[in-house]
């Protein structure tokens, strides 16, 4: 007796089809799973056996062999429980096998036969649609997430009995539908707003420029100056996520099991804040069983590194590839996985170990050598990849007590959207979609400066001893400032403001 059930598994952030082949033969009662299963898949035999019995079906006392094809790719997770149980029942003619070839079946089984949620349902639904299959059976908790994908029928199942009834046509079934407009409206709301920030107009301006051009930004200031407060509000002024961006972002959170309950789609920009004790694998991904890291979870959003010099140097250095390429490649002996990592880097740090080198009201207790060693924890190549360095001064009591409400995020976001629209038209025939991602050739083409601005750049290069990469960064930021003003040519005022945002290139902090 042989049955074949289609299932799916995740490889990287995308999914692929897996054929679950079940053979029941005469012999001593055994239950073997082949096809490179991991521990969770091997343990499914006990869950499947108990679930079948507790659901009112007979478990065959025969030799059972389950093959997961393709057999040369390692299978992980518990999503094969339900298709394995369906295959065993289909091999006994308890499930109609004529429809099994057109359905992808997924789900983890509890011992009582109920179906538990899985990871990666969205990616698997995309694969089912691309394979032109009739539909996909997923746990009820994952049905709304999978139904975000248009063009494939999604059915949520509560238990093994429920799945059997649906496949046999014994119970009417209605595909799960999701109103994407409503999902966007419900989840596209932020808990914070720029109107909460008191003062710091210079820093707000720098954050707006960073958002408008997709530039990485480093906030430098004493404790309590508002660096973290500004960074947390950066996603609120970024352009609204498109549907494609929302789906690609949701994919990463889904395979990590981080999708909020009852929320089928992430419609807000991610904001990730890893602790400075994080490992390199935790930051960019990896591990014995490769998983996406914080840079991938921040895809299409913001990665905020607070207390930047406290991160281990080798951990910060692994950021260089994703900052340049927008993706992370994890190579293993048998395979290579690529995770998306197109994010904005926002970082914050003190100007010195004690934090008060730039505070006019408190005395700094650090020596020049200590400050130099502290700043040297951030390598030059990494610092060159951060377009904007901005000093955030401490707030005065008069500013804290000011009752004036600041400009809301919505108003700033509209200006950012208009600047991004200019960049979208500029780069519509290239892979870049904002000024921060311009190549050297694109910089030469799109960053034309007048004579006064060119002279100013030459003097800045000589006095500040800027690297070639820093020179390009200044031009990119100046291009963004010009875009915010809807100016075609980069002027001297734009270049002068961009140079002001390279504070760490201007010498000692005290």
Image: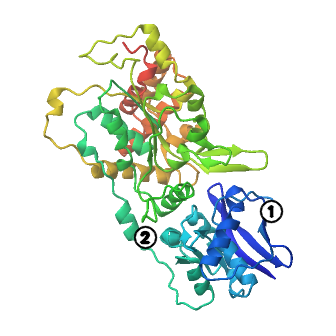
Q: Quadrant of the C terminus?
A: top left
- Can residue 178 be seen here? The reply is yes
Q: Quadrant of residue 507?
A: top left
The residue labelled by disc 1 is 71
Q: CA distance from mark 1 to mark 2?
A: 37 Å
Nearest the viewer among 172 and 39 is 39
Q: Residues within 10 Å of mark 2 (few under 14, many from 20)?
A: some
Answer with left or right where residue 23 lies relative to residue 193: right
In the rendered image of this protein, does residue 425 appear above or below residue 82?
above
Q: In x, y percent, where is residue 469?
A: 56, 29
Q: How far across and down, in percent of the image, does residue 388 sit?
A: 43, 32
Kindly report which numbered mark, 1 or 2, lies closer to the viewer in this rendering. Answer: 1
Placement of 175 over or under 481, stated as above or below: below
Residue positioned 57% across, 61% down in the render: 119
Asked where in the image residue 135 lies, by quadrant, the reply is bottom right
Residue 437 image offset from top left, x and y in percent: 54, 43
Q: Residue at x 61, y 56 (%)?
A: 13
For residue 180, what is the image quadrant?
bottom left
Q: Who comes first in sequence, dot 1 or dot 2? A: 1
Q: Is residue 177 left or right of residue 84?
A: left
Give residue 345's mark: none
- Residue situated in front as seen by the camera: 155 or 58: 58
Which element type, helix, strand or loop, lies under badge 1? loop
Q: Is residue 194 left or right of residue 316?
A: left
Residue 180 shows which numbered tag? 2
User: 10 Å neighbourhood of mark 1: few (<14), some, or many (≥20)?
Assistant: some
Q: Position of residue 456 (x, y in %)?
A: 43, 23
Quarter that holds the N terminus: bottom right
Q: Are marks 1 and 2 in contact (CB under 8 Å)?
A: no
49, above or below 300, in the image:
below
> Residue at point 80% right, 62% down?
71
């Amino acid at each position: 007796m042989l049955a074949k059930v289609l299932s799916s598994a995740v490889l990287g952030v995308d999914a692929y089809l897996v054929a679950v082949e079940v053979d029941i033969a005469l012999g001593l009662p055994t239950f073997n799973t082949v096809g490179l299963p991991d521990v969770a898949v091997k343990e499914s035999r006990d869950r499947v056996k108990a679930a079948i019995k507790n659901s009112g079906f007979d478990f065959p006392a025969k030799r059972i062999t389950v093959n997961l094809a393709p057999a040369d790719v390692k299978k992980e997770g518990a999503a094969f429980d339900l298709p394995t149980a369906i295959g065993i029942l289909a091999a006994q003619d308890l499930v109609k096998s004529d429809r099994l070839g057109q359905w992808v079946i997924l789900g983890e089984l509890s011992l009582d036969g109920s179906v538990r949620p899985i990871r990666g349902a969205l990616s698997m639904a995309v694969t089912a649609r691309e394979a032109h299959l009739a539909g996909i059976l997923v746990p009820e908790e994952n049905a709304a997430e999978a139904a975000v994908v248009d063009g494939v029928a999604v059915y949520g199942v509560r238990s093994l009995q429920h799945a059997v009834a649906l496949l046999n046509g014994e119970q009417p079934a209605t595909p799960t539908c999701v109103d994407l407009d409503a999902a966007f409206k419900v989840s596209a709301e932020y808990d914070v707003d720029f109107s909460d920030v008191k003062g710091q107009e210079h820093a707000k301006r720098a954050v707006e420029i960073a958002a408008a051009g997709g530039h990485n930004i480093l906030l430098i200031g004493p404790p309590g100056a508002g660096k973290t407060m500004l960074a947390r509000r950066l996603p609120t002024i970024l352009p609204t996520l498109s549907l494609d961006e929302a789906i690609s972002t949701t994919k990463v959170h889904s395979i990590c099991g981080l999708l909020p309950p009852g929320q089928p789609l992430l419609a807000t920009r991610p904001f990730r804040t890893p602790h400075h004790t994080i490992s390199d694998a935790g930051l960019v991904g990896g591990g014995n069983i490769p998983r996406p890291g914080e840079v991938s979870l921040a895809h299409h959003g913001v990665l905020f590194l607070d207390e930047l010099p406290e991160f281990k140097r080798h951990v910060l250095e692994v950021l260089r590839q994703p900052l340049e390429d927008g993706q992370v490649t994890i190579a293993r002996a048998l395979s290579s996985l690529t995770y998306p990592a197109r994010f904005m880097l926002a970082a914050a740090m003190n100007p010195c170990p004690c934090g008060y080198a730039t505070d006019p009201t408190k005395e700094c207790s650090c020596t020049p050598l200590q400050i130099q060693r502290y700043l040297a924890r951030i390598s030059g190549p990494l610092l060159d990849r951060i377009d904007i360095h901005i000093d955030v001064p401490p707030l005065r009591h008069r500013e804290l007590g000011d009752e004036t409400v600041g400009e809301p995020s919505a108003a700033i976001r509209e200006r950012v959207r208009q600047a991004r629209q200019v960049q979208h038209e500029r780069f519509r025939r290239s892979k870049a979609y904002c000024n921060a991602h311009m190549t050297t050739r694109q910089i030469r083409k799109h960053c034309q400066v007048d004579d006064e601005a060119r002279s100013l750049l030459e003097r800045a290069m000589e006095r500040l001893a800027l690297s070639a990469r820093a020179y390009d960064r200044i031009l990119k930021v100046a291009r963004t400032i010009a875009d915010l003003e809807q100016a075609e040519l980069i002027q001297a005022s734009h270049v002068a403001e961009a140079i002001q945002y390279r504070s760490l290139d201007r010498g000692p902090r005290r």
